[in-house]
Amino acid sequence: MAKKFPLKPAHPERICWGCDKYCPAGSMACGNGSDRTPHPAELFGDDWHEWEPPVEGGASVAGTRDAEDPSRDAPDPGGSGQA
């Protein structure tokens, strides 16, 4: 069984997060490479576990349309030319 993954470790820079061994950064035993794998909090910030992928179709989780959606400027499929 895998160990429980810590959401906000006190010193994530001291540990390699590449496998379930959680080796010290200076003494990696798993052969995961020459560099340690950073914790997601180091890469994405402390709220990394709250992130949700965007909803398909251009709407955000809150239900607002994406401002960069090119389809909003597309002509009306009905052909009337008016919005």
Image (cartoon, grey):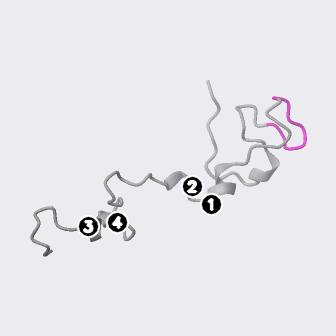
Going 36% across and 61% down the picture, which residue do you hit? 60
* Placement of 3 over or under 76, stated as above or below: above
Q: Which of marks 1 and 4 is nearer the N terminus?
A: 1
Going 15% across and 61% down the picture, which residue do you hit? 77
Cα distance between the residues tagged 1 and 3: 37 Å
Q: Earlier in the sequence, mark 1 or mark 3?
A: 1
SS at circle 4: helix
Q: Which amino acid does label 2 sit on?
A: Trp
Q: Which quadrant of the figure has residue 1?
A: top right
**As drawn, which residue projects farthest toward the right?**
26
Q: Earlier in the sequence, mark 3 or mark 2?
A: 2
Cα distance between the residues tagged 3 and 2: 35 Å
Disc number lying in front (1 or 4): 4
Is residue 29 rendered magenta in the image?
yes
Going 80% across and 43% down the picture, which residue do you hit? 36
Magenta range: 23-30
Q: Label 1: how many residues lie within 10 Å, few (<14), some (14-19) or many (20+)?
A: few
The circle on residue 70 is 4
Q: Which amino acid does label 1 sit on?
A: Gly
Q: Which amino acid does label 4 sit on?
A: Pro
Going 76% across and 37% down the picture, which residue do you hit? 22
Q: Mark 2 points at which residue?
A: 48
Q: Name the residue under label 3.
A: 74
Is residue 27 rendered magenta in the image?
yes
Q: What residue type is labelled 3?
A: Ala
**What secondary structure characterizes most of the magenta part?**
loop
Q: Where is residue 11 in the image (x, y as percent from the top left)?
A: 76, 54
Q: Name the residue under label 1.
A: 45
